[in-house]
Amino acid sequence: MNDIIHLLPDSVANQIAAGEVVQRPSSIIKEMVENSIDAGAKNVKVLVTDGGKTNVQVIDDGIGMSETDARLSFERHATSKIQKASDLFNLTTMGFRGEALASIAAVAQVELKTRRREDELGTMIQISGSKMEMQEPVACPVGSNFSVQNLFFNVPARRKFLKSNQTELTNVVADFQRIVLVHPDISFTLYNNGVEMYNLPATSVRQRIIDVFGKKINADLLPIEVETSLVRISGYVGKPESSKKKGSHQYFFVNGRYMRHPYFHSAVMKAYEKLIQPGEHVSYFIYLAVDTSSIDVNVHPTKTEIKFDNEQPIWQVLSAAVREIIGQFCNVPMIDFDVEGKPNIPVMGTTTSIPQQPKLAPSTYNPFKSGGAQSYSRSNGWEKLYDKYASSGFKDDEQGMEDEVQPVSAGFEGDLLKGADIPEETNLQGSIWNEFAVESGALPMEFDVSVQKFQYKGRYIVLPGTNGIMVVNQHRAHVRVLFDQNMQCINAGSRPSQKELFPIVVQFETSDCIVLEDLMDDICSLGFDLSNLGGGSYSVNGIPTGLEGIDISTLLHDMIVSAKEKTNDIRKDAQEALALTMAENAAIVYGQVLSTVEMERLLQDLFATKTPARTPDGKLIYTIIEDKMLNDLF
C-alpha cells in the first residue's frame, strides 16, 4: 500500500498561509504600511484601485532594502525582527519586511522597487503566485514601492467572496484610520481610483484625530493622562453629552498597535454609568504603553487581539482615570456661599402674618363634574361608570363615556383617555399619513378598530375585543407602517420631496462619503435631494414630506451608520437599513396624544402590512391579554 502523507509544495503552503494573513485588500495595506513604518518612513502614500481588488500600491521613503534583502523578503519564514523563540514575547516593531510578503505574493501579482540611500541603483522584483518572474537593477527613489495587483487571481474561490468595491474600500479606510491614528508623526495620503481621500500631514495626536474625523469632534474630546508602574495611559475620551447609539469612534492602542479589547471597553463604559442613556456609547482614543514582555500579540493572526498579564489592575486604573477626567471637566455647577457679605436671604420676622389656609371643600363638591359644586353619590358616580365598562365592553354610548371619563382622566398621571377631545382633523406627526392609501387588513381575534378605544400614557393603544384586550405600542406600530411605505418608495424609485428654501449643509467623514455615494440613488428615492459640494460636504436641497421638525443632519448620519453596519454584500440590506432608520426618526413619539380617528387609521394601516406583529428589527408591536388571563388575576 502506498504512503498517503506527503509534503505540500511551497506554493500551496504559501496559499494556505495567506488565508490567515490576507483576507481582503485592507489586510495587504495593513501589512505593507506597517512595514513602511518599521522602515523609518516619514511619508507614506497608499493608492488603491477598485477598492483594492485590482491594485494596491504602497510607496514610502524609508531606508529601503538591498538586493539580497529584497529577494529574501518574499521567502517563507523570512524576517528581520526574530532571532530566537524568546523574541516572540518581546516584540518592539510591527514587522520589518518578510513574513506577510510571502503570503501576499502567493495569491497576487507583486512588483517591488526599492533602493537604499547608499546604493546608486535599486532593485525591481516581479513575483506572480509565488513564482519569481523577474529581478533586475532599476533606477528608483530611496525607499520602497510595493504594487500588488489582481488579488486572489489564482484562487477563484477566494476572489468570489470579496465584497463590492465600495465595501472593500470601506474596509481599506477603516484599517488606514487605525494606522494613522497611532502614528501622527508620519505623513499619510490615501488615493482611490486617482482621487485623493486623505492628506494627513505630521502633527499631534489630537490634531490627527480632528483631521481624520472632522472638526466637530474637537469640542467633545477630554484629555486623559495617567502613569503607573504597570501602564501609562494617554489619549482622549468623549464628553457624556456627546454619547450616541450609533457611529461612535472607539479605539484602543497598545505600544503603537491597534487592538480590540472588550474587557477594557467595559472599564471605559463603567466610568460613564448613569451619565449616559443605556445602550449609548461615547467616542474614545486611548493609548496604552506597557512592558512588551507583559503582553502577547500573537494570539490572533491579524494581531488585533492581545493578551495582557495584568488585565484586572489595568482595568481598574483605566476606569478610575476616565472617571476622574469626566468629573474634572464635567462638574455640575455648585452654589458658592464663600462671597463677601451675607447672602440676601429674607428672614421671616415674628410679626409676619401667616397666610390663612383655604377652607375645606364642602361635602357636596364633586370634582368629576365641570359645573362646580354638585351633589355626588356612590350610586350614580363611579359605580355607574364601572358598570358601563364591565357590561358593554367599552362599546356602548361612546359620547356619554367621553363626557364622564374625560374630566377624570385630566387629573391622572397616565392621562388614560387623554386625546378624546382632540379635533378629528388633527394629523399624526408630518403629513405622510395622507400620502399613502392603505387598505384595512384583518385583525386577530375579530378585533374591530371602529369600537371604543383609548390611549394609555401616550404610549399604548388599548383596543377591546370579543375574547380579550389588545395593547398596541403606537411608536413601533408607526415604524412598521412607515418602513413598508419607505421600501415601496425605494422599489418604485420615487417619493414626494419638499424643496428647502434655505438648503442645509451636512458634513460627512470620508468613510461615510463612500457609503453615501454608493447609496445615493436609494436615498434620493426616499425623497432626499443632495448635492456634493466637495470635501465631504453635501447640500440638502430637498427632504421627504412628513419630516418637518426632524434634525436632517442627524437622520442622514444615522442612515449611513446603519447601512455601514450591514456586513453582507446585499444591496437590499442597506436599503432596509435606510428605510428603517428613516421610519424610526419619522414615527410618532412616545407621549404624543392621538385622536380617535388617528388611532383607528394607525391600526388599520398596521394590520394591512404583511408582518404586523413585529418591527423590521424584531421588536414586539402588540400583545393580546385574553379574558381568561384577566379572570385568573381575580
Image: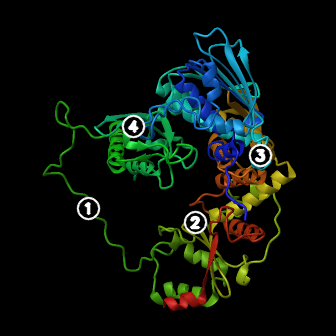
Against 370, residue 39 (above or below) is above
23 and 206: which is toward the camera = 23
Mark 3 or 4: the one toward you: 3
**Image spot of residue 498 (x, y percent):** 78, 42
Q: In the image, what residue type sits under mark 3?
A: Val
Against 441, residue 581 (above or below) is above
Residue receiving disc 3? 155
Mark 4 or 1: the one toward you: 4
The answer to which quarter of the image holds residue 453 is bottom right
Residue receiving disc 4? 292
- The mark nearer the N terminus, 4 or 1, is 4
The answer for how far apart the CA atoms under marks 1 and 2 are is 42 Å
Q: In the image, what residue type sits under mark 1?
A: Gln
Residue receiving disc 1? 356
**Image spot of residue 161 (x, y percent):** 75, 49
The answer for how far apart the CA atoms under marks 4 and 2 are is 55 Å
Q: Is residue 250 left or right of residue 233?
A: right
Q: Is residue 504 left or right of residue 183?
A: right
The kind of secondary structure element at disc 2 is loop
Of all residues, the one furthest to the right in this rendering is 492
Numbered badge on residue 459: 2
Q: Residues within 10 Å of mark 3 (few under 14, many from 20)?
A: some
